[in-house]
Image: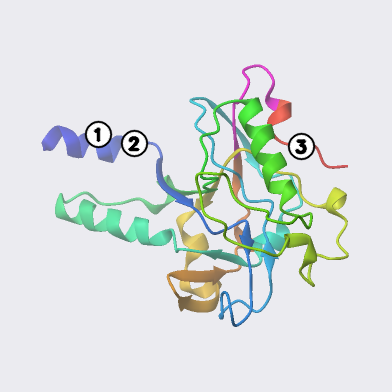
Amino acid sequence: MKIFKEVISGLDEVWLISIQVSLRQMIGGEDEWPTIRKTFFERSLPIHATAHNFDRIGLDPRTVENDLSHLHIRNPKLLYGSWLQVLETIEVRPCEERYRLLLAFNPRRTICDLRDAEDWLQWEENGWVPKTGSTWPSQESQIESVAASETPESRDEDISMTVRPAFGFWLFPVDAFCDANKTLEPRNCFTTFDVRKHRPELVLARLNEGDMDRNVSKEV
């Protein structure tokens, strides 16, 4: 136990991982998420990939402020609270500055390379176009019958001008998800946060070694 405590105390940085499913698309209204008044498509949220290497490029350079103003998530700071309980049990004093909350979207597919990523993006993009019998991948059940592009919030949206997707994850300081940044109280496990004051770092998965630029589309 002594050696374990020394290892934990000597870590330069600790990432607490929160890979979430219901983040990039949430349908608001009484019949869906009653605490969410609008339909949101938070396309800036990084998509989790299983690549073994990544590049930590610093603060997310994309235009992400709108999505950061209303993140609807299962509060990742609960992970930090659980970890603090572990540290208290083994009598290790935590240093909050060393901790980061890793946040990403679970695509429900294994994405290992560029081909996987392109296939998944094409599948997601197809959801914006009205199609009869549109479904999720064949191994999963159909979850919606109305195309995303048909919702009032998105019908007139120019998709070519939206934030481009990235495969990887965000890193937030733990205090980004404090009570002061809540804009809606929790319901059905989800809480809405405004984290614009805590712009996250963007970490890109290396889906093709030596070709990092293809992992995140450039914005004009």
Which mark identifies residue 38?
A: none
Task: Locate residue 22, reporting x and y percent.
Answer: 54, 59
Q: Residue furthest top?
A: 210
Question: In which quadrant of the rendered view does residue 79 lie?
Answer: bottom left
The residue depicted at 60 percent of the width and 83 percent of the height is: 30
Residue on which disc 2 sits: 11
Q: Residue furthest front?
A: 133
Residue on which disc 1 sits: 7
Which of pointers 1 and 3 lies earlier in the amino acid sequence?
1
Instruction: Please tell me whether mark 3 sits on a helix, a strand or a loop.
Output: loop
Question: In which quadrant of the rendered view does residue 208 lie?
Answer: top right
Instruction: Estimate how packed mark 3 is, as few (under 14), some (14 to 19) or many (20 or more) residues with alpha carbons within 10 Å.
Output: few
Residue on which disc 3 sits: 217
Instruction: Give the position of the N terminus as an image quadrant.
Output: top left
Task: Locate residue 152, reporting x and y percent.
Answer: 79, 72
Instruction: Please tell me which residue lies in front, 118 or 20.
Output: 118
- Residue 166 visible in the picture: no
Position of residue 139 relative to residue 43, above or below, is above
The residue depicted at 71 percent of the width and 53 percent of the height is: 127
Q: Which residues are magenta?
A: 203-212
